[in-house]
Structures are given as C-alpha cells and as structure tokens.
Image (cartoon, rainbow, N blue to C red):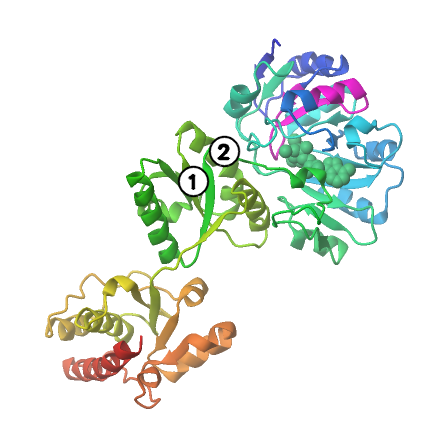
C-alpha cells in the first residue's frame, strides 16, 4: 500500500495538508496521527469496513475494541446511550486530555468498533494535529495505538514511519508524544468508577473528582484463564521488544550489583544485555544502558522509546529498574510488567547498614569508617556489606571535620574522601540495620518513619553496651574526638560479631 507521509509541527498545524488526510478518513481509509499520549492509527469509527482496516493494519485480535476519538465534548451524546454525572465531571475536568471513558453505546457504533461489546470507549485528545484532523474529517475517529499488535506503542515520529509505512494510507508525524503512555481507561458503566488501564491521569487525580475509584483486579497481574480483564486489550501480550525483559527489584545498591552481575554472566554466555534505569544511576551500570530520565514523568514519556531502542541495539536481554507504584508510576509499572511478561528478579544485595547522626561530619562518619575497618579485619567479607552513613540535619557534600579525619588517620584510616549525605526516606527503607548515635536520632526515626522501627537501634544499644548516647565531639578539641573514636570503636567490635 502507498503511504502518504507528512511531517508536521504540533504548534503550526498546516490545515491545507490536514484537509488531504481528512479526505482519506472520509473515504474510509486509515491515517496515523500524533496524540498527547501515543501515536494513533485512525479510521472512521462509524464505518464497519474502515474499522476493519485498523485491525488488519495492526494484526489486532478482533475482540479488542477501539477507542473513539472526538473533537467536541458534545459528540459524546451522539455516541453514548446515557452520560452519567460521573462522566460529566470527568469531561469537564480532564477533556481534552489523556483519559478515555467507557459508556453504554448507541447503535450508531458498529460492533467492529466496539469489539462486539455493548459499550464504547471515548476520548477527546488535546494534541493540536489530532484535533485539527478529527475536526476536518467531521467524524468520530476510532484509533488504537499505532503499533503492530503486541509491540511497544509508538511515541516518536520515526517509530511510526519505521513500523507502519506501507500498512496504512496516511501518516502525519508531529514529533514526540508528551505523555508517552496511553490514556487512562475509566469504566463508568457500573455503580463505582473503575480504572481498566492506568495512565497519565492518576487514580489520585480521579478520586479528587469522583470519590472512591476502583481498579480492575486483574491490573498488574498475569491473567490466568479464570479471571477476565475488563478491558479486552489488557489480556494480550503487550509492549514486547524482541529481547526478554526482566524487572529487578531491591535496594538501589542491591539492584545495581545484581544487574551488573547478570550482565556479566550474560556476556560470558555470548548474550548482549541492555539496562534501563533513571538518569542518576546511568554511570553505575555495565552493558547497553538506556537513560529513562530524571523523573517519573520523564520515565513515562521515554519508556516505549527505550524498549524500541533496545531492539535497534539488538540486545538479547533487558534488565529494568523498578519504579514506585504511585501516581504515574502505576501506569509505568503496568506497561513495564506487561513488557516483561511479569518476570521479576529479586536483588539479594548486600546487607545495608546505615549509621546516623545529625550532620554526618563527625560521629556517623567515624562510625562508618570504623565499622568498615572492623569488618575488613574480621573473618567477614566487606563485599557482603554496604556500610554508609547519613545525617538527619546534614548539608550534602561536606568533608568530615578536620579532627575526625585526624583521629582516624592516627589509626591508619583515610577519611578525607568522606562527603556528608542527607538522610532520605528511601535510605531508611532500603537499609537492613540502622545505627543511631543518640536516642534522639533513634526517636526521630521511630516517629517519622514508624514502619521501619524494627531495624533502628542506638549504636550502644545494638552493641549491648547500655543505651546511652555516644558523646558529641562537635566543636571540641582532638582529645574529645579521640574519646569518641574509642567509644564508637568499642561498640563496633561487638557489632561486627552480631551482623
Ligand atoms: O492514549 C490512548 O488511549 C491511545 C491513543 C491513540 O489515543 N489509544 C490506545 O488505544 O491506546 P488501544 O486500542 O491501544 O487501547 C485501548 C484499550 C484496550 O485495552 C481496549 O481493550 C480498551 O481500551 N477498551 C476499548 N474499548 C473498550 C470497552 N468498550 N470496554 C472495555 N475496554 C475497552
Ligand atoms: Mg495499544
């Protein structure tokens, strides 16, 4: 099939050109266009034969219904049998934008478009090219993501051209899609609204408008034959690059170490492996590393591109970091787990011991160095431990105090490399043991992060040497620093026997 291709800019839509593509849609042909989520493969939603062409171009199973894209909010009343108040609230708040609602359909929607269901999925996109095209066609446009069925959804101009040229009548490109993951699909046909597919409009945002919102219980689970996903499309293999994908979880340090060891094992087997991670850890991994970005929003927008990039790099295996299941993280993990076929690897990792004080320039720094030294001198291997320190009121990146460095130097330990670190919630969560210099540090952790209470001890308490505070040498002379070193050193000897 000859494909008419036009490269456009979302901010300067060429209406004359749009008219030519709208004409193709009016003739019952297929046109790919950008949306704010992913590229869509469109055809007249009211025309059975046109809708059939979408299934053929994608190789999509026939029971998987299409989303109908509209230009004007009022169009909903032509397509849906009834528009409940919940739908009106969503439309007012989020349209045009990345959310699709499921309503009972009118008979004007052919069963080819609704995949044989009595309901219809409707969405009003905000992308300017999409809006101009739907307006010019004067039709509701059925449009699934513009990928071959099972592959990652396209989010960049080159993805659609590489994958779909020759399979459709027209392609309009418009650069990168903003969100990069498909719209949230919300079923409004039952008593309680239910998310059938998480997307960039999050559960939290929906609940702020609608009150309680349920989630399809099959989300993020490998579907077995007994439990049926409510969105038919969610049961199919999805977002799969050619490589085998695994999601690796555990502490940050553990994940880095695990992935690097898997990459090196793969290399010995002659396999090429890729790693997908957040920007801050790009330098820590071996293999073909793809940077997913600095924030969850960036990860969402880069994820499909990264999976497609892995194919270009011809990797055999992909290891991805895991992301928090909150906000847009839910949509990310939903897509990532599907692309991995739910294969996850737990990083056993090292035993993570975190030493805590206030500024992380005196006591906790001394504690960290003495603990490392003591482990080195014991029968244990430092390779099995991740020993670090942080301060609850620390300033990031300061050197250890001069006297702390001096008293460690006196016993042959070089501490000049130390940089103070601010204690974060993530560090507390990842740690397997937390040793505080004082009871007030311990109480602070118990109060602010109570679910970690079982792993928080004072240094002396864990060492079995009473429960008093380690003296604070801050601002004092060398003698008090020596005393602090001895006090901490005595505890550390006992601690190493227990870990
Ligand atoms: O962001 C998006 O939604 C993109 C862009 C192009 O708009 N479109 C998209 O369409 O992702 P598609 O076909 O790849 O995914 C539609 C999802 C499928 O999981 C499908 O099963 C579900 O929505 N769906 C469609 N109609 C439905 C219905 N009546 N009831 C339940 N689920 C439905
Ligand atoms: Mg899709």
Separation of disc 2 and disc 1 at Cα? 9 Å
Residue pushed farthest top? Answer: 2
**Chain part drawn in magenta:** 31-54
The verdict on label 2 being within 8 Å of ligand 2 is no
Tell me if residue 38 is in the magenta stretch: yes
Tell me if residue 156 is in the magenta stretch: no
Mark 2 / mark 1, whichever is N-terminal: 2
Q: In the rendered view of the protein, which quadrant contains the N terminus?
A: top right
- The residue that disc 2 covers is 241
Q: Is residue 405 above or below residue 192?
A: below
Q: Is residue 477 above or below residue 22?
A: below
Residue 126 visible to the viewer: no
> In this image, 32 relative to 242: left or right?
right
Element type where label 2 sits in the image: loop
Q: Position of residue 443 (x, y in %)?
A: 44, 81
User: Where on the picture, by quarter, is residue 421?
Assistant: bottom left
Q: Position of residue 365 (x, y in %)?
A: 26, 70
Q: Quadrant of ligand 1?
A: top right
User: In this view of the protein, which residue sits in the foreground, 42 or 440?
Assistant: 42
User: In this view of the protein, which residue sits in the foreground, 447 or 3?
Assistant: 3
Q: Position of residue 198 (x, y in %)?
A: 64, 46
> In this image, 152 relative to 204: left or right?
left
Q: Is residue 339 above or below residue 365?
A: above
- The residue that disc 1 covers is 318
Residue 376 visible to the viewer: yes
Q: In the rendered view of the protein, which quadrant contains the C terminus?
A: bottom left
State if disc 1 and disc 2 touch (CB < 8 Å).
yes
Q: Is residue 313 above or below residue 408?
A: above
For label 2, the crowd category at 10 Å Cα-Cα, with few meaning under 14, some 14 to 19 and many 20 or more, is many
The verdict on label 1 being within 8 Å of ligand 2 is no
Element type where label 1 sits in the image: strand
> In this image, 14 relative to 158: left or right?
right
């Amino acid at each position: 099939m000859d494909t008419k291709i036009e490269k456009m800019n979302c901010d300067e839509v060429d209406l004359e050109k749009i008219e030519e593509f709208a004409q193709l849609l009016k003739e019952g042909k297929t046109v790919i266009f950008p949306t704010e989520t992913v590229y869509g493969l469109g055809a007249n939603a009211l025309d059975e034969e046109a809708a059939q062409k979408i299934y053929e171009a994608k190789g999509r199973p026939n029971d998987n219904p299409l989303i109908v894209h509209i230009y004007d909010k009022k169009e909903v009343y032509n397509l849906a049998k009834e528009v409940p108040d919940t739908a009106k609230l969503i439309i007012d708040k989020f349209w045009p934008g990345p959310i699709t609602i499921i309503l009972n359909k009118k008979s004007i929607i052919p069963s080819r478009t609704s995949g044989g269901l009595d309901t219809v999925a409707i969405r009003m996109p905000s992308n300017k090219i999409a809006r101009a095209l739907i307006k010019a066609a004067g039709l509701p446009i059925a449009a699934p993501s513009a990928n071959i069925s099972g592959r990652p959804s396209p989010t960049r101009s080159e993805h659609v051209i590489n994958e779909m040229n020759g399979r459709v009548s027209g392609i309009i490109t418009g650069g990168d899609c903003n969100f990069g993951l498909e719209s949230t699909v919300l079923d409004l046909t039952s008593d309680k609204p239910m998310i059938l597919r998480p997307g960039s409009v999050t559960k939290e945002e929906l609940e702020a408008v609608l009150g309680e919102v349920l989630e399809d219980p099959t989300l993020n689970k490998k579907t077995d034959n007994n439990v049926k996903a409510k969105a038919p499309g969610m049961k199919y293999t999805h977002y799969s690059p050619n490589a085998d994908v695994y999601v690796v979880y555990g502490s940050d340090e553990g994940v880095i170490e695990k992935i690097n060891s898997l990459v090196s094992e793969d290399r010995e087997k002659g396999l090429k492996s890729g790693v997908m991670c957040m920007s801050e850890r790009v330098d820590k991994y071996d293999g073909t590393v793809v940077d997913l970005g600095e924030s969850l929003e960036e990860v969402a927008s880069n994820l499909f591109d990264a999976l497609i990039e892995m194919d270009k790099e011809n990797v055999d295996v992909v290891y991805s970091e895991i992301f928090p299941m909150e906000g847009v993280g839910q949509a990310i993990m939903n897509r990532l787990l599907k692309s991995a076929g739910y294969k996850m690897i737990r990083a056993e990792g090292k035993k993570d011991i975190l030493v805590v004080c206030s500024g992380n320039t005196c006591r906790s720094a001394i504690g960290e160095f003495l603990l490392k030294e003591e482990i080195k001198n014991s029968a244990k291997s430092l390779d099995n431990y991740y020993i670090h320190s942080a301060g609850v009121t620390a300033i990031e990146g300061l050197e250890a105090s001069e006297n702390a460095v001096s008293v460690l130097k006196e016993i042959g330990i070089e501490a000049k490399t130390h940089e103070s670190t601010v204690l974060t919630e993530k560090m507390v969560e990842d740690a397997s043991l937390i040793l505080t210099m004082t009871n007030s540090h311990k109480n602070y952790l118990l109060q602010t992060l109570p679910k970690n209470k079982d792993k928080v001890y004072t240094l002396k308490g864990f060492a079995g040497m009473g429960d008093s505070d380690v003296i604070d040498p801050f601002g004092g002379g060398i003698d008090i620093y020596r005393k602090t070193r001895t006090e901490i050193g005595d505890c550390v000897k006992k601690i190493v026997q227990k870990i």
